[in-house]
């Protein structure tokens, strides 16, 4: 079992298996993930009964946008020095 993140391709499969009543262990085995990874992902995204793939994708997209937004911008003296050295 690998301890990797749940990727976009795994989300729909995970959702279908949850609705069908499979255990976290069975889902993890199918996806090739650790059961704790699946459990943490599902519980942090609404739980077994309220898991919604569209909402998970929306949260991931917003998180990524905010991560890029917070990048530090180079300005002032440092920007001048960088452009002079090039």
Image (cartoon, grey):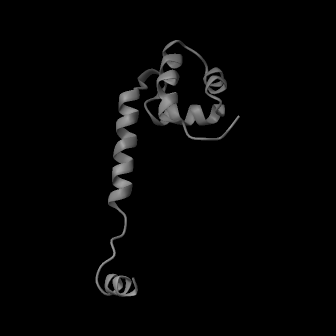
51 up-or-down from 67: above or below: above
46 up-or-down from 13: above or below: below
> Looking at the picture, how far across and down is residue 54, in whole percent?
36, 29
**Residue at figure coordinates x 52%, y 12% from the top left:** 20
Quadrant for the N terminus in the image: top right
Q: Is residue 29 left or right of residue 41?
A: right
Quadrant for the C terminus in the image: bottom left
Image quadrant in which you'd find residue 78 = bottom left
Nearer to the camera, 4 or 46: 4
49 up-or-down from 36: above or below: above
Nearer to the camera, 77 or 47: 77
Image quadrant in which you'd find residue 37 = top right
Q: Is residue 33 left or right of residue 58?
A: right
Image quadrant in which you'd find residue 28 = top right
Q: Is residue 24 left or right of residue 63?
A: right
State how many labels appear: 0
> Looking at the picture, how far across and down is residue 71, in whole percent?
37, 64
**Residue at figure coordinates x 38%, y 48% from the top left:** 63
Q: Is residue 6 left or right of residue 61?
A: right
Nearer to the camera, 58 or 83: 83
> Looking at the picture, how far across and down is residue 48, in whole percent?
49, 23
């Amino acid at each position: 079992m690998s301890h990797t993140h749940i990727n976009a391709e795994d989300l729909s499969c995970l959702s279908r298996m949850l609705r069908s009543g499979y255990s976290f262990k069975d889902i993890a085995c199918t996806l090739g993930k650790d059961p704790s990874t699946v459990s943490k992902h599902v519980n942090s995204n609404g739980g077994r009964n309220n898991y919604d793939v569209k909402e998970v994708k929306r949260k991931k997209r917003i998180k990524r946008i905010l991560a890029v937004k917070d990048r530090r911008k180079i300005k002032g003296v440092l920007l001048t020095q960088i452009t002079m050295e090039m």
